[in-house]
Image (tube, helix red, strand yellow):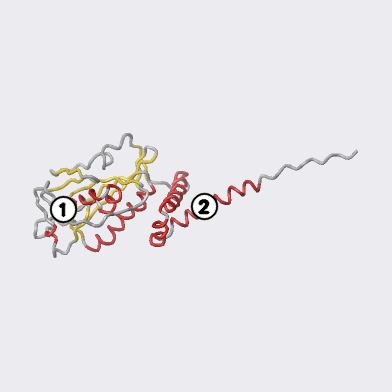
Amino acid sequence: MKKKKKKSKPSRAPAIQFITIPVSLWIISAILYSSLPQETRRPIYEAVPRLDRILRRTSFQIFSGWDELGIGGTDCTTFVPAVKSGIYSIGGQPSDPFKLRHLNNRGYAVGYSESFKNPLWATYRIFDVPKLESPPRPSFQRDPRSSAGVKPDDFTRSGYDRGHVAPNFAIATRYGPEAQKETFLMTNIMPQDPLINRYLWQKLEHRIAKEYGRYFEEIWVTTGPIFTRPVKRLPTGIAIPSAYYMIVADIHNEQLRTP
């Protein structure tokens, strides 16, 4: 009597390959896509913004997970319970020895110095949005809330740009056209060297708005000018900064971290 042959169990390899190959291709595609220059990604972003968003967030989650493993080092983090204390500021508004006029706007808050005729700080919060849509650029306006009375013409032929402290683009894409108009109030403007304002500073602002604002759930920014003595001034009395600062923070797993 012949022995019955045992039926071999079907191999799981094809099933595993069916899953792992598409997943691997998706991960590789997401990483490669996010590493492309912004101008190269622009056609896809404009045609299919949802796909652009998914690919870039996938890439960020991959790198974020790798960072949490701690193999190649991690972000600087610290535990800070109940750190959110304002709409636009993290951990409270900046403190300083000067008497400042605190101005709350639709998309940001600012601490304005009437004597320096400058905002000494601005705080704002940005978050992910489906598409970055910015209205047309409005005109600069005098802020009637300020007794300094700085006007847009005070910068004319001064050699300095009217530099935003809270940025036009980030506020416009998150809070809308009315909030954007308030970024053009002169209480949000500081003198900036054109080479800084139009290149380095703008790149920083756009990276936060376009990259960090889409990768992280929330990003909190505190920014402003730095003055050293003796303080130089424009003929109109506006103090000229010697440097600028920008602090970017995020909360992750109840920890404050800086990207």
Residue corresponding to mark 1: 186
Residue 194 to residue 26: above or below = below
Residue count near mark 1 (Cα–Cα under 10 Å), binned few <14, some 14–19, many ≥20: many
* SS label for mark 1: helix
- Which three-letter amino acid code belongs to the residue tagged 1? Met
Residue corresponding to mark 2: 26
Quarter of the image with the N terminus in it:
top right
Residue drawn at the location 22% of the way across and 54% of the way down: 164
- Which three-letter amino acid code belongs to the residue tagged 2? Trp
User: 258 left or right of 103?
Assistant: right
Q: Observer-nearest residue: 21 or 256?
A: 21
User: 135 left or right of 54?
Assistant: left
At which x and y percent is residue 141? Answer: 15, 54
User: 1 left or right of 133?
Assistant: right
Residue drawn at the location 22% of the way across and 49% of the way down: 178
Residue drawn at the location 23% of the way across and 45% of the way down: 106
Q: Real-space Cα distance between discs 1 and 2?
A: 47 Å
